[in-house]
Image (spheres, rainbow, N blue to C red):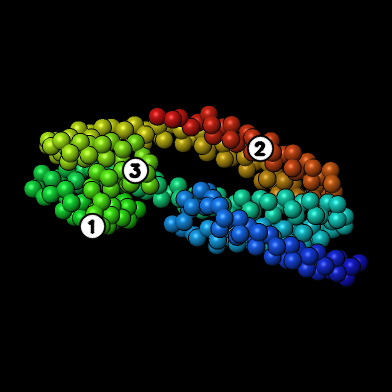
């Protein structure tokens, strides 16, 4: 019986890899013909072509592993094993993309956390007598993190002939934060119409500081809600693991029968809906 399973698995793997080659070629050709904005915004971390390859190979690997695990648990029906393995493949297809989206989000958060330091440093540098370009160069050398990377791009554009107000507009296009828009507008007005930019920056610093303090208090107030949403979502999986360790014979039908996997799928959908509803309730837009 096990040899039959191995033969079936080897045959399925051969056809899967042939299909994989066709899918990869098609996706890469489609990517070359039409730029996908979902991939373009992640270019800083991974090339779009590599991201497509990672998603495809990750999905296929997850599907194969899920199929093997089902064989180990005694799932003998292909009508159960193939759809479950496909579901795991689709899940990993999305998880790989979400992984890079999370990296992008963390970079944006790190950038946003440096906006106040940037505004304060720019105001202090201008008060000390430095020109705007010199102040930006001085800050970019010591501020670090994503903010330093973006300022270096801004200064490089300025060296190539782009005016600083336009370079700040490009910065806002890359990092669309409201505080950056305020800074960009203030710098554009000051450069084109004159006036004391350092005094304007002092007011902007006060506004940004008040906004960050409020957001910090708001985040602390909703921390318990975020933890509860995560705990409630993980509770069914934890319960299944505990019950399986206590009585494997009772819980084995959940992963070896079609009705069991339908129950798992239904529970996963309901838990996901509950998690996103709770997350929406505790997310306050300001």
- At x 79%, y 51%, the residue is 83
Gap in angstroms between the C-alphas marked 2 and 1: 53 Å
Quadrant position of the C terminus in the picture: top left
Spatial separation of the CA atoms under disc 1 and disc 3: 18 Å
Residue at numbered disc 2: 271
If you read the primary sequence from the N terminus, does the residue marked by circle 3 or circle 2 appear first?
Answer: 3
Distance from disc 3 to disc 2, alpha carbons, whole Å, reads 37 Å
Residue at the spot 20% in from the left edge and 36% down from the top edge: 189
Circle nearer the N terminus (2, 1) = 1
Whether residue 174 is visible here, answered yes or no, is yes
Residue drawn at (58%, 40%), measured in percent from left and top? 231
* Circle 3 SS class: helix
Of badges 1 and 3, nearer the viewer stands 1
Q: Nearer the viewer, residue 182 or 223?
A: 182
Q: Is residue 245 visible?
A: no
Rendered image quadrant of residue 260 = top right
Whether label 2 touches label 1, CB < 8 Å: no
Residue sitting nearer the eye, 27 or 264: 27
Q: Nearer the viewer, mark 3 or mark 2?
A: 3
Circles 1 and 3 in contact, beta carbons < 8 Å: no
Where, quadrant-wise, is the N terminus in this rendering?
bottom right
Q: Secondary structure at mark 2?
A: helix
Residue 101, percent from left and from top: 50, 49
Mark 2: few, some, or many residues within 10 Å (few <14, many ≥20)? some
Mark on residue 172?
3
Considering every residue shown, the one lying at the far left of the view is 129
Percent position of residue 17, x then y:
73, 66
Classify residue 146 as left or right of residue 89.
left
Q: Where is residue 24? Give x, y as percent.
A: 65, 61
Return the disc, 1 or 3, that comes first in the chain's sequence.
1
- Give residue 18's quadrant in the image: bottom right
The disc placed on residue 159 is: 1
């Amino acid at each position: 019986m096990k040899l039959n399973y191995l033969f079936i698995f080897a045959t399925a793997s051969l056809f899967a890899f042939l299909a994989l080659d066709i899918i990869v070629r098609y996706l890469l050709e489609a990517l070359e013909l039409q730029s996908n904005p979902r991939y373009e915004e992640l270019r800083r971390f991974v090339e779009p072509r590599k991201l497509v390859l990672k998603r495809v190979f990750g999905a296929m690997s997850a599907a194969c592993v899920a199929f093997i695990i089902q064989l180990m648990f005694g799932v003998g029906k292909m009508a159960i094993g193939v759809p479950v393995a496909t579901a795991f493949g689709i899940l990993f297809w999305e998880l790989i993309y979400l992984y890079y989206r999370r990296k992008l989000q963390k970079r944006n958060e790190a950038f946003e956390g440096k906006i106040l330091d940037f505004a304060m440093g720019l105001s202090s540098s201008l008060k000390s007598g430095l020109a705007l370009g010199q102040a930006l160069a001085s800050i970019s050398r010591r501020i670090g993190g994503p903010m330093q990377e973006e300022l270096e791009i801004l200064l490089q554009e300025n060296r190539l002939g782009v005016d600083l107000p336009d370079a700040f507009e490009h910065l806002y296009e890359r990092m669309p934060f409201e505080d950056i828009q305020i800074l960009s507008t203030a710098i554009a007005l000051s450069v084109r119409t004159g006036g004391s930019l350092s005094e304007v920056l002092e007011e902007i610093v006060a506004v940004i500081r008040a906004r960050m303090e409020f957001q910090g208090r708001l985040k602390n107030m909703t921390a318990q809600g975020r933890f509860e949403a995560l705990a409630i979502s993980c509770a069914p999986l934890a319960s299944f693991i505990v019950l399986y360790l206590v009585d494997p014979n009772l819980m084995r039908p959940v992963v070896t029968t079609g009705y069991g996997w339908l129950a798992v799928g239904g529970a996963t959908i309901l838990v996901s809906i509950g998690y996103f509803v709770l997350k929406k309730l505790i997310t306050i837009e300001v």
